Amino acid sequence: MTLISVVVPAFNEEYTVGDIIDRLKGTLEEINAKSEIIVVDDCSMDTTAEVSKHRGVMVYSFKQHMGKGYALRAGFAKAKGEIIVTIDSDGSNRPEELPLLLEPVLQNQADLVIGSRFSGTTGTSGKKFNAAGVRLFNKIVRTLTGAVVTDSQSGYRVMRNRVLKGLNLRSGTYEIESEMLVKIAHHRFRICEVPVSFEQRTYGVSTLDPIFDGLKILMSIFTSYLRD
């Protein structure tokens, strides 16, 4: 049976991470999947780590705050599964939709599946400014790599572990999604999207700065393409 590793980066998400873990467990049990859940605690100042450990999953905690990119890279290094899942810990994604993302990979139809907030017919609750930025990044990625995606910045993804091998990921913060996508597309792996639900966080505060992080994402798209 194929092992599925779910990597959950978390920073100050004590109010949501427990619910995400519980729902992930329930969903994975429903589809009878052999799995491991890895929470990477990015030096949270609340009880994120304790809440996660209480649910019996693997938890790796940083001694200082490093960023989402570092957290995901650490999780990838620990993951043993043939299939890797990434999902945010703020409650914006629905673990119940994971089977939809897994199916194209399990059916050998894709190497990377992105859960798109913008490809479905149902609107999502998010900031218009962020959505405009995503559209810009989508266009640049398409121009450089030919990959046609509607949500290049989605953190809800399923991919084969072998796809990550040799990518030499460098990102430390939110630009990690762009770096992964550009390098995977550049290697001509098969990429597809499935529509997913999305809800703006109801607890806590996002650390994403639309201007500063937006510029980092933009730079990452170009540098990932040139350095690949």
Image (cartoon, rainbow, N blue to C red):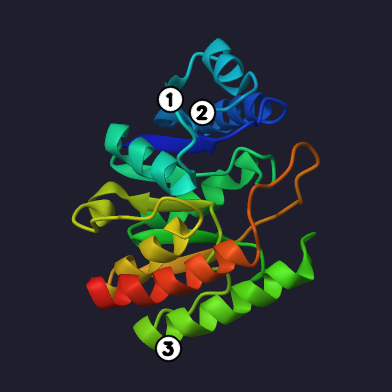
Vertical placement of residue 88 versus 55, above or below? below
Is the residue under label 3 in contact with that under label 2 (CB below 8 Å)? no
Sequence-first disc among 2 and 3: 2
Disc 3 residue type (three-letter): Thr
Q: Is residue 33 visible?
A: yes
Secondary structure state at the residue bearing disc 1: loop
Is the residue under label 2 in contact with that under label 1 (CB below 8 Å)? yes
The N terminus sits in image quarter: top left
Secondary structure state at the residue bearing disc 3: helix
Disc 2 residue type (three-letter): Cys
Q: Residues within 10 Å of mark 2 (few under 14, many from 20)?
A: some
What percent of the width, then of the height, locates residue 157?
48, 53
Sequence-first disc among 1 and 2: 2
Name of the residue lying farthest toward the bottom? 143
Vertical placement of residue 126 versus 85, above or below? below
Q: Badge 2 is on which residue? A: 43
Q: Badge 1 is on which residue? A: 63
Q: Which residue occupies the foreground of this view, 197 or 204?
A: 204
Vertical placement of residue 81 versus 112, above or below? above
**Count the marks: how many?**
3
The C terminus sits in image quarter: bottom left
Q: Residues within 10 Å of mark 1 (few under 14, many from 20)?
A: few
Q: Badge 3 is on which residue? A: 143
Residue 25 is left or right of residue 188, and the answer is right
Q: Which residue occupies the foreground of this view, 149 or 227?
A: 227
